[in-house]
Image (cartoon, grey):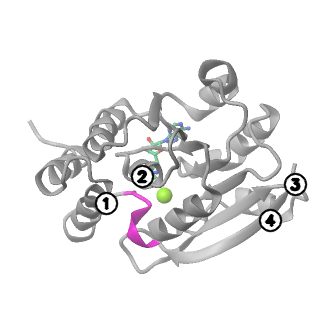
Amino acid sequence: TQSTRPQRLLGAVQKNATRGDPCSVVKAIDHFCRHKEWAMNVGDEKGCILDSVVSEINPATVLELGTYCGYSTVRIASRLPPHAKLITLEFNPDFAVIARQVIAWAGVEEKVQLVEGASGDWIPKMKEQFGIKTFDLVFLDHWKDRYLPDTKLMEECGLLRKGSVLLADNVICPGTPEYLEYVRNSPRYESRYFKSHLEYTKVEDGLEKSVFLG
Ligand code: SAM
Ligand code: MG
């Protein structure tokens, strides 16, 4: 039977990365995606921006929307302080199976809870199901038309506090115009663009970091 791209990506991790070494897992995936097959990970260039935001915030609670193969999950989890928790949502079960193995290979599974299902279904249940009060950081990287409705849903559900940070990927490519217009013009956010490139390409893309002001 034919293998899928996520399966081949996992194969590259198992062949080239050291168990328990998140940095080597990230490197193996970047090498595979730059030289063999492109895949929709945040990638090395925007990944450095993601790393610096995680380190700056030093969050105790993180929500990631869109796990795919767990690349950004590993990047974020490996920079979290002890006892911090990262919940990552993925609605494609084939991707979730791969991501669990990538996360375990990196040795960060204790910090990560991978939840299978759609963001719109899970966000309203976060408080009761996972005992979350608010998220210190949310990384938005799922389907682009969900950024705005899910942000409004997180606001309604009381998952954001004054100072919570939303970090959104792909705001230029493929682009999230309604979301950008919202966070840049709403008095409830202070928003800033970090210019970069679409993963593994020279095409402009970037991350938008938006601080919720309450
Ligand atoms: N964050 C990952 C990384 O950088 O390594 C890449 C995530 S990929 C760009 C987007 C993922 O979001 C896909 O795997 C897709 O199945 C998932 N997804 C899209 N919409 C979703 C939703 N509403 N709820 C849960 N998962 C979703
Ligand atoms: Mg992305």
Q: Is residue 155 left or right of residue 139?
A: right
Marks 1, 3: nearer the viewer: 1
- The residue wearing badge 3 is 188
Q: Amino acid at mark 2?
A: Ser
Q: Residue at image x 85%, y 54%?
A: 213
CA gap, disc 1 and disc 2: 8 Å
Residue sitting at x 20%, y 47%: 19
> Which of the two discs, 2 and 3, sits closer to the camera?
2
> Badge 2: how crowded within 10 Å, few (<14), some, or many (20+)?
some
Classify mark 3: helix, strand or loop. loop
Of helix, strand and loop, which one carries label 4?
Answer: helix
Q: Counting residues from the N terminus, which is met first, the one under dot 2 or under dot 3?
A: 2
Residue 28 showing in the rendered view: yes
**Callout 1, which amino acid?**
Cys
Which element type, helix, strand or loop, lies under badge 2? loop
Q: Is residue 42 magenta?
A: yes
Which residue, as the protein is rendered here, is positioned at the far bottom? 202
Which of 175/158 is in front?
Answer: 158
Spot occupied by residue 22 in the image (x, y as percentages of width and height): 32, 54
In the picture, the disc for residue 184 is: 4
Q: Amino acid at mark 4?
A: Arg
**Are discs 4 and 1 less than 8 Å apart at CB?**
no
Which of the marked residues, 1 or 2, is nearer the chain's N terminus? 1
Residue type at mark 3? Arg
Answer whether residue 169 is visible to the viewer in this image: no
Q: Is residue 39 magenta?
A: no
Label 4, label 2: how many angstroms apart (C-alpha)?
A: 30 Å
| Residue at the spot of label 1 | 23
Pointers 1 and 2 in contact (C-beta within 8 Å): yes
